Amino acid sequence: MLVDFEQIQKARSGDDAAFNQVVLAYRKRIMGTIARLIGRPEDVEDVAQEVFLRLYYSLDQLRTPEVFEPWLHRLTVNASYDYLRKQRRRHESRMADLSEQQVMMADASAGGKANTDERHRTQVRELLDSLMGSLSEDDQILLKLKEVEGLSLKELEKIYRVKENALKVRLFRARQRVLRVFEAQSPKE
Amino acid sequence: MENFDQKLDSLFAAYREAVQDPDASADFMPKLWSRIDAKRSFVYRLKRMSQVAVAAALAACLLGGALITPLSQRTPHISGTYVDVLAEAHAEDAVAALGGVRIDLLDADQQ
């Protein structure tokens, strides 16, 4: 825990200063998780604020200190999921308005501005995001929490409130699907 | 496939490296509090509206009750079942209907 439970209790009873402390303690970690889950740096703050807004209005439901972190993770997962769903709808309509050539030109000019390191990072992000595109938003988040965030099955079990075996099956299927797309996209040796 | 399994693991690790924990901007907290306050005032308005709606419903119930009570008092009071009331209204008929039973206490010989 990054803060004492006493601090959380104070925040729960309406102490705004205590709530500020909780936000400041978890903000960077939550923003990092969101950045990797949604893959759009410009919207990370907005989603993080949504997470803390939900936290503020649901703190009174918290019963024990042990569940605070899994619970905050669950709020993060839910807010990221809502964002990805909205984003997919927006993206579909936006891409439908552009011609294929316009999309290619936009990609090329974005690549031209970046330096080498940044370009490499962008390529990694784009590659993984394109592979993840074959999964539902739900499975994308689950797989990233496991493989990128490095959460254990026990931690995922607490976040999702689902049995470990069910999570294993979902993770296995998601990974297999990503592997198939990865194999299909790679040039034949 | 095994080869791709390893490649995918490396890609996940590279992704973790490529997307670092970002720093929040200076107006993160002010924006968060303005969102909290906006929602708080919305929730307050919603609560207020629901209180008004409940009060209005209660008043309508009381008014309805006040109008219906005198009307119900005007109708004659009937206690008992329909048969009881009918029997009470025609007491003599009821006895006749049963028919008088004549019992001769004396023996026919004595008569």
Image (cartoon, coloured by chain):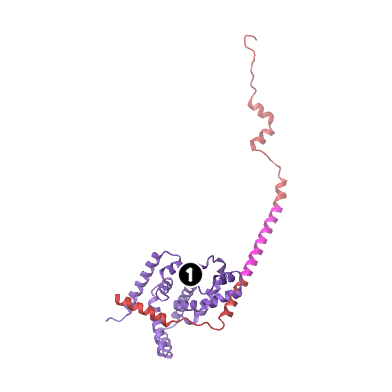
Chain colours: A purple, B red
Q: Residue A148: percent from the left, percent from the top?
A: 41, 76
With respect to residue A112, does B41 lie above or below?
above
Residue A168: image location, x then y, percent: 38, 67
- The spot of residue A23 in percent (x, y) is 54, 76
Name which quarter of the figure residue B79 lies in.
top right
Mark 1 nearby-residue class (10 Å; few <14, some 14–19, many ≥20): some
Q: Where is residue B13, by image quadrant?
A: bottom left
* Farthest top residue in view: B109
Q: Quadrant of residue B36?
A: bottom right
The part of the chain drawn in magenta is B43-67
Q: Could you tell whether A6 is left or right of A148 in the image? A: right
The vertical placement of B79 against B38, above or below, is above
Question: How many numbered badges does the structure rendering display?
Answer: 1
User: Is residue A120 in sight in this rendering?
Assistant: yes
Q: Identify the residue at image location x=57%, y=77%.
A: B32
Please tell me which residue is depicted at 66% across the width and 26% down the height of the picture.
B96
Instruction: Reply yes or no: does residue B65 show up in magenta.
Output: yes
Instruction: Out of A117 and B92, give the one closest to the viewer.
Output: A117
Residue B1 shows in this picture: no
Q: Is residue A140 magenta?
A: no
Q: Relative to A178, does residue B58 appear above or below in the rendering? A: above
Q: Secondary structure under badge 1? A: helix
The answer for which chain carries disc 1 is: A
Tell me residue B71's x, y (percent): 71, 49
Residue shown at the point (63%, 66%) measured from the top left? B47
State whether the magenta stretch is mostly helix, strand or loop.
helix
Of the pair B22 and A95, the residue shown nearer to us: B22
- Name the quarter where the C terminus of chain A is drawn: bottom left
| Residue type, numbered disc 1 | Pro
Given residues A104 and B15, the one toward you in this image is B15
Q: Which residue is mark 1?
A: A70
Q: Nearer the viewer, residue B54 or A40?
A: A40
